[in-house]
Amino acid sequence: MASKPRVLILGGLGFVGRNLVCYLVEHELCSKIRSVDKVPPSTAWLNERHNAAFHHDSVEFKSANLINPVSVEKAFLDSDGGFDVCINCAAETRYGQSEKVYEDGIYKLSLNCAKQALKFKVKRYIEISTAQVYSCNKGESDEKSKTSPWTQTAKYKLLVEEELAKLDGLNYVIVRPAIIYGIADRQGLTPRLIIGAVYKQMGEKMKLLWTKDLKMCTVHVNDACRALWHLSNHGNSGDVFNLADKSNTTHPILLGILSLYLAPREVSPILCARFLEFSMNILGLSCLTWRG
């Protein structure tokens, strides 16, 4: 029987990273998991479940500044034989930062990691990009759709994708997720929940800039973790994969669901069904694993 793979998770204390560590531990998928981040677990505000995962015997933490090439090299060094899979969850995803912050925190960081993955002969390197590389004014996009980044994050993620193709010998795949949400989310759907609650408390109507046609495609973090692990041994080098659930969520649908939390009222059966699905997902029950 083949031994279980050894996995290196870069940005392992971030939203996706901590959930990925937990997923791999709970499903006993790896012989070793190294989580690399600049933030130590003790100050990362882990919940009880995630904290237990990081204390599992198969998990080790290594502090590193992934913008620094020397620090990245140390993150890959391993006396037990190296790593089979490297998943890069690290990136600057905050909005409103300077151009230099995105250049360093996405472009420079990701290339540092990819070059070390090539140097240390990692069997599969997975780069998490973003679906924001597609135009926001078009309809549905598949992996072959024309790219037109509309955020700074997407701009530098796309540059990273282009550079990875130039690293001869690197076995890699790229994942372009929609809005990821779930336990420990702070930037996807959570701000809308909080702001909605604030407006309700103030007794004011929340006005929005966008129209009813705006797509808000989503994917639960549990499903994102499953997809990332699936790609550790599926797909060909250089492949690009979009990642989203099948809900085809729009802005008014999402706001209608959120409003049920804040001001329950009589609604259509369809919206009730979507509300139930969303409720289970926000509580951590993946829509791909639940069967009604």
Image (cartoon, grey):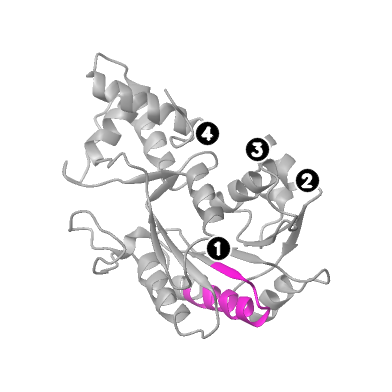
- The residue lying toward the viewer, choosing from 225 and 104, is 225
- Numbered badge on residue 171: none
Q: Quadrant of the N terminus?
A: bottom right
**Which amino acid type corresponds to the residue marked 4 in the rendered image?**
Gly
- Numbered badge on residue 284: 4
The secondary element bearing badge 1 is classed as: loop
> Residue at 55% across / 78% down in the picture?
170
Q: Are circles 4 and 1 on residues that touch, CB within 8 Å?
A: no
**Which amino acid type corresponds to the residue marked 1 in the rendered image?**
Ala
Residue 49 percent coordinates (x, y) = 67, 36
**Which amino acid type corresponds to the residue marked 3 in the rendered image?**
Asn
Residue 91 percent coordinates (x, y) = 51, 64
Residue denoted by label 3? 47
The secondary element bearing badge 2 is classed as: loop
Q: Which quadrant would residue 122 be assigned to in this image?
A: bottom right
Q: Is residue 34 left or right of residue 221?
A: right
Among numbered discs 3 and 4, the one appearing first in the sequence? 3
Residue mark closest to the camera, 3 vs 4: 4
Q: Are circles 1 and 2 on residues that touch, CB within 8 Å?
A: no
The secondary element bearing badge 4 is classed as: loop
Query: Mark 2 Cα within 10 Å, few/some/many (few <14, many 20+)?
Result: some
Q: Which quadrant would residue 266 be assigned to in this image?
A: top left
Q: Which residues are magenta?
A: 107-125
Residue mark closest to the camera, 4 vs 1: 4
Residue denoted by label 1? 90
**Which amino acid type corresponds to the residue marked 2 in the rendered image?**
His
